[in-house]
Image (cartoon, rainbow, N blue to C red):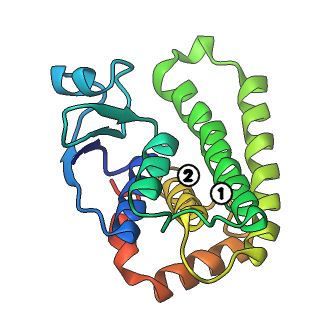
Amino acid sequence: MRLLYSKPSPYSSKVRMSAHLCGIELDCVSTDTSAEGDDLLRTNPIGKIPALELDDGSTLYDSRVICEYLDRVSGNLLIPQGLEAWTLCKRIEALADGLTEAVMATLYEVRYRPEEKRHQPWVDKQWRRAHRALDVLEGDLAHLPAEPSLAHFAVASDLGWIQLRYPGTFEEKNPGLVRWLEAFYAANPAYEAMKPAA
C-alpha cells in the first residue's frame, strides 16, 4: 500500500504510527500538497493528505478513515473493542484532531490571508477552542491505558504538530501534556521518528 503524506502533517503522523502498530508496511511518498500534482489528485480528488492507495488501486482518504481501515485489516489491533474503551479512544482522537483543526485555522489565517483581511476575533475564537481542548485532554489522558492505541497516536501527533508550529502554546499551562508526551516516547521510542517534523 502507498501512503501519500507530508512530514509536518499530524494526520500523516497518526496514520504512520497506526500502521506501525498494526504491523502494516506502507510505501510512504512525501507529497507537496500546495502543488496539487496529478498523483495526489488521482489518489484524493480533494487534494489533501494523507491519502492511501490500496494494493488493488482503490484509494482511501482522511486519516480517520485510513486508521479505521488499518484497524479492520489488522484484526482490531488499533482501536479497543470494549464499549467503554472504544468510547474513550474515539473521544480522545476527536478532541485531539479538533484541537489541531482550530490551531491550523489560525495558521492558515496568517499564511493565506492578506493582513488587511485577517479577522482577529475569529482567530481568538479558534485559540479559545484550542485551549479548552488542551485542558480537557490533560484530564482525559489520565484514563488512557499504557498500551498504545489510536488515541495515543492522535494525541502524540497533534501535540507534536503544535510544538512544531507554535512552540510554547501549552507547555507552561498544561505540564501534564508535556509529561505524557515524554513518557509516551520513552516507552515507545519507535514512534518518535514518525512525529510531525519540518
Q: What element carries label 2?
A: loop
Residue at x 52%, y 28% (from the top left corner): 108
Asked if the residue at tag 1 contacts the one at tag 2, i.e. Cβ–Cβ closer than 8 Å, the answer is: yes
Q: Quadrant of residue 115?
A: top right
* Pointer 2 local density, CA inside 10 Å: few below 14, some 14–19, many at least 20: few
Q: Is mark 1 on a helix, strand or loop?
A: loop
- Say left or right for 181 vs 70: right
Residue 15 place in picture, x, y as percent: 41, 53
Which residue corresponds to mark 2? 166
Residue 47 place in picture, x, y as percent: 34, 23
Hey, what amino acid is under mark 1?
Thr
- Say left or right for 188 vs 155: left
Mark on residue 169? 1
Q: Nearer the viewer, residue 134 or 24?
A: 24
Q: Which of 7 and 93 is in front in this view?
A: 93
Hey, what amino acid is under mark 2?
Tyr
Mark on residue 79? none
- Examine the rendering and report whether any part of residue 12 can be seen: yes
Is 35 rendered above or below residue 67? above
Q: Quadrant of residue 93?
A: bottom right
Residue at x 55%, y 69% (from the top left corner): 149
